[in-house]
Amino acid sequence: MNGSSWISLTLYWLGHVAAGAILVGVLVAPWLDGKIAAGGFWERAVAAFATDAVLRRTALASALGLLVTARVFFRSASAPRVSSAAEN
């Protein structure tokens, strides 16, 4: 495994992990709203995600963008590509 493929694989998985973290944050925020110590940064951030629909939609779109970026730019060269019926 050369250095370039190691970096690509790492970025591929980091993109997936970041997208998953955003998705979990969006899904868990309404449940955590009001359960975190008052006055701190995290309490305000969770409240924003729990109450603001535009912020949640933007975060989900960003997570989708991270997934697409990881798959398009950092996919392993050995990963099989699906060919269309027109090419066969």
Image (cartoon, rainbow, N blue to C red):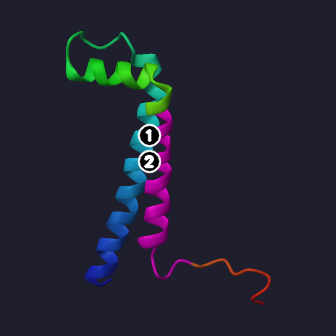
Where is residue 1 drawn, in percent x and y?
32, 83
The residue under the point 46% across, 40% down is 58
Question: Is 64 colored magenta in this rendering?
Answer: yes
Question: What segment is highlighted magenta in the picture?
Answer: 56-79
State yes or no: discs 1 and 2 in contact (Cβ < 8 Å). Answer: yes
Q: Mark 1 points at which residue?
A: 59
Which circle marks residue 21 in the picture? none
Determine crowd level at label 2: few under 14, some 14-19, many 20+ residues with C-alpha closer than 10 A. some
The furthest residue to the bottom: 88
Query: Whole-percent x and y of residue 66?
Result: 43, 55
Q: Foreground residue, 71 or 48? A: 48
Residue beneath disc 2: 62
Would you place residue 12 above or below residue 16 in this image?
below
Percent across and percent down for residue 30 are: 46, 19
Tell me the amino acid under the disc marked 1. Answer: Ala
Q: Residues within 10 Å of mark 1 (few under 14, many from 20)?
A: some
| Secondary structure of the residue carrying numbered label 1 | helix
Residue 48 included in the magenta stretch of the image: no
Q: Residue at x 29, y 14 (%)?
A: 36
Residue 60: give x, y in percent of width and height.
Answer: 49, 41
